[in-house]
Structures are given as C-alpha cells and as structure tokens.
Amino acid sequence: MYISIVLVVDTIVSFIDKEILIEYLDKRRKNEVLAVVGDFSKAKKKLGWIAKTNFRHGIRVTFEWYS
C-alpha cells in the first residue's frame, strides 16, 4: 500500500475537532525524494513478523500519544 504525505496529513486532520487550512505547494526542491517505499516481506519471511496495526489506527494512537 502506497501512503503519501498528503494521506498522512489528511488522516491527522480528520482527528482534530477544528478546521485547519493546509496549503499544498507545487514547488519541489532540487533533488527532492518523491517517494520512499517500504517492503516488509523480508521481515515476514525471516522473522515471521506481520503488522498488528493498520495505518489509520497507528496514526490515531500516535496522535493521541502526542496530544
């Protein structure tokens, strides 16, 4: 599953009770990394590891911990 920064921001904003204005810019910095993709298949194969928390729940728990 590809998770963008926009999705992370939108998910966090959905937990907040007030309206927040987010400004998205089209400009990118020179040599900016556009995407980083993680593959956990090796951890699953070698260690038997599987995620116990989905993305939305993990962001919510982290958000609540910092709040």
Image (spheres, rainbow, N blue to C red):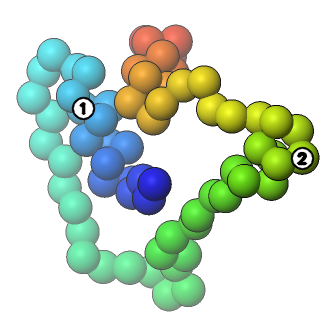
Note whether residue 45 is visible. yes
Q: Amino acid at mark 1?
A: Val
Q: Residue at x 30, y 79 (%)?
A: 27
Residue assigned mark 1: 13
Mark 2 is on which residue type? Lys
Q: Residues within 10 Å of mark 1 (few under 14, many from 20)?
A: some
Viewer-nearest residue: 47 or 67: 47
| Residue holding disc 2 | 46
- For the C terminus, the quadrant is top left
Q: Residue furthest bottom?
A: 30
Secondary structure under tag 2 reads helix
Tell me what residue is drawn at x 54 percent, y 25 percent: 53
- Seen in the picture, residue 55 relative to 27 is either above or below; the reply is above
Q: What residue occupies the far left of the structure in this picture? A: 19
Q: Left or right: 42 with respect to 62?
A: right
- Asked whether the beta carbons under mark 2 and mark 1 sit within 8 Å of each other, the answer is no
Residue 45: image x %, image y %?
82, 48
Vertical side of 62 occupied by 33: above or below: below
Residue 48 position in % (x across, y down) = 82, 36
Q: Quadrant of residue 52?
A: top right
Q: Is residue 63 visible?
A: no
Q: Say which label, 2 or 1, has the lower sequence index.
A: 1
Residue at coordinates 58% horizontally, 66% vertically from top-left?
A: 36
Q: Position of residue 20 (x, y in %)?
A: 15, 34
Q: Which mark lies nearer to you, 2 or 1?
A: 2
